[in-house]
Image (spheres, helix red, strand yellow):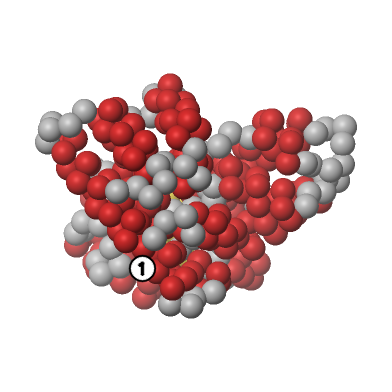
């Protein structure tokens, strides 16, 4: 990302850029920065945008071969084309002989780094991976926004906020806006403010349910399950996410057994550090054998539901009841 900012600052650009990765908020921000730098006057005559699969490659190449009209550059933005997952030999070949006035920006959700398109753009241009940001980066970003608004927050409440929002920056920005409006007349944001206005993401609701199960609090776990059903969350998705959470608990438990510290566990599991702390609070309530059995049970139940041998709603309920018991068997 720094390299893109350097290119903009120095006004020395590559002719082809590829932005990809899970962090959609940053991809959009940098997409707009680069397009604005290339086209500061908002010229629509020499700027074209294509989106989605099924783009006519011949049309793109024909447009690329058209000289810009009273402008330095012709700019083509292509988003979510699938060109970096499937073969596109014609465009790949064209990338090796771009006219000097042509500037291309690809923005993709998924790419295959083994594809010729990916390798070609990497060779002639710049490839930027917008991955999910780590805990420290997200906290710095949120604190920067709060500082501009004259707000303060404790470390603990910051972690509480991020545990509700998840790591998606678009969602964080939306929830932060709600918080700022809610605390308009105050300088300090509290945990009570966060609980009052911030929406807990589905994954985090699932983890809250796992925590309730680990605490042998059947009522709370089932209440959370019924809440998810009331929100029209499909039981199969809840089942899948429960299986994933127990699998992560097992991974954390085994890494703890190997003597790994919190930072190492976060790195190996891909979890944020404060999330690892939440997981380690649950792992002590289960043996490794119990967690392995839970993963097997959830996986087998998924298969039984898919094949119609079991009811989805009732199956999840029974698993919650089973693992919210002391010494589940």
Q: Which sits in the foreground, 308 or 289?
A: 289
Q: Which residue is mark 1?
A: 121
How many C-alpha atoms fall within 10 Å of the one at disc 1: few (<14), some, or many (≥20)?
many
Residue 79, horizontal then vertical, whole percent: 38, 48
- Residue 300 seen in render: yes
> Would you place residue 188 above or below residue 92 in this image?
above
> Would you place residue 140 above or below residue 80 in this image?
below
Write the residue at 39% across / 60% down. Answer: 287
- Residue 7 seen in render: no
Q: Residue furthest front?
A: 327
Write the residue at 57% across / 60% down. Answer: 277
Write the residue at 72% across / 53% down. Answer: 156
Q: Is residue 155 left or right of residue 9?
A: right
Dot 1 lies on which element? helix
Q: Is residue 165 left or right of residue 181?
A: left
> Would you place residue 258 above or below residue 247 in this image?
below
Q: Which sits in the foreground, 201 or 84?
A: 201
Count the numbered circles shown. Answer: 1
Q: Which sits in the foreground, 55 or 231?
A: 231
In the rendered image, which quarter is residue 133 located in? bottom right
Residue 120, horizontal then vertical, whole percent: 31, 71
Q: Residue furthest bottom?
A: 259
Write the residue at 26% across / 33% down. Answer: 315
Residue 294, horizontal then vertical, whole percent: 31, 51
Considering the image in quadrants, where does the N terminus appear?
bottom right
């Amino acid at each position: 990302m720094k390299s893109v900012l350097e290119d903009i600052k120095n006004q020395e650009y590559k002719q082809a850029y590829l932005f990809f990765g899970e962090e959609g908020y940053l991809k959009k921000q940098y997409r707009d920065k680069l397009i604005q730098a290339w086209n500061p006057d908002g010229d629509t005559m020499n700027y074209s945008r294509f989106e989605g699969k099924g783009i006519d490659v011949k049309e793109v190449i024909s447009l690329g071969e058209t000289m810009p009209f009273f402008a330095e550059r012709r700019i083509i933005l292509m988003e979510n084309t699938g060109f970096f997952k499937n073969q596109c030999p014609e465009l790949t070949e064209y990338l090796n002989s771009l006219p000097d006035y042509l500037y291309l920006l690809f923005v993709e959700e998924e790419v295959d780094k083994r594809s010729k398109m990916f390798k070609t753009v990497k060779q002639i241009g710049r490839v930027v991976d917008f991955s999910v940001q780590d805990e420290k980066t997200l906290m710095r970003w949120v604190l920067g926004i709060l500082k501009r608004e004259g707000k303060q927050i404790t470390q603990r409440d910051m972690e509480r906020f991020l545990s509700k929002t998840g790591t998606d920056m678009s969602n964080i920005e939306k929830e932060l806006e709600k918080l700022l409006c809610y605390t308009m007349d105050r300088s300090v944001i509290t945990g009570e403010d966060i609980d009052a206005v911030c929406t807990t993401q589905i994954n985090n609701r699932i983890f809250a349910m796992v925590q309730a199960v680990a605490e042998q609090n059947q009522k709370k776990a089932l209440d959370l399950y019924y809440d998810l059903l009331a929100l029209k969350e499909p039981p199969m998705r809840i089942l899948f996410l429960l299986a994933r959470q127990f699998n992560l608990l097992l991974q954390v438990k085994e890494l703890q057994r190997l003597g790994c510290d919190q930072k190492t566990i976060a790195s190996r599991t891909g979890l944020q550090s404060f999330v690892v702390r939440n997981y380690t609070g649950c792992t002590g309530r289960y043996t490794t054998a119990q967690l392995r059995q839970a993963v097997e049970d959830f996986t087998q139940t998924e298969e039984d539901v898919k094949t119609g041998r079991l009811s989805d709603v009732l199956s999840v309920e029974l698993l919650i009841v089973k693992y919210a018991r002391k010494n589940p068997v």
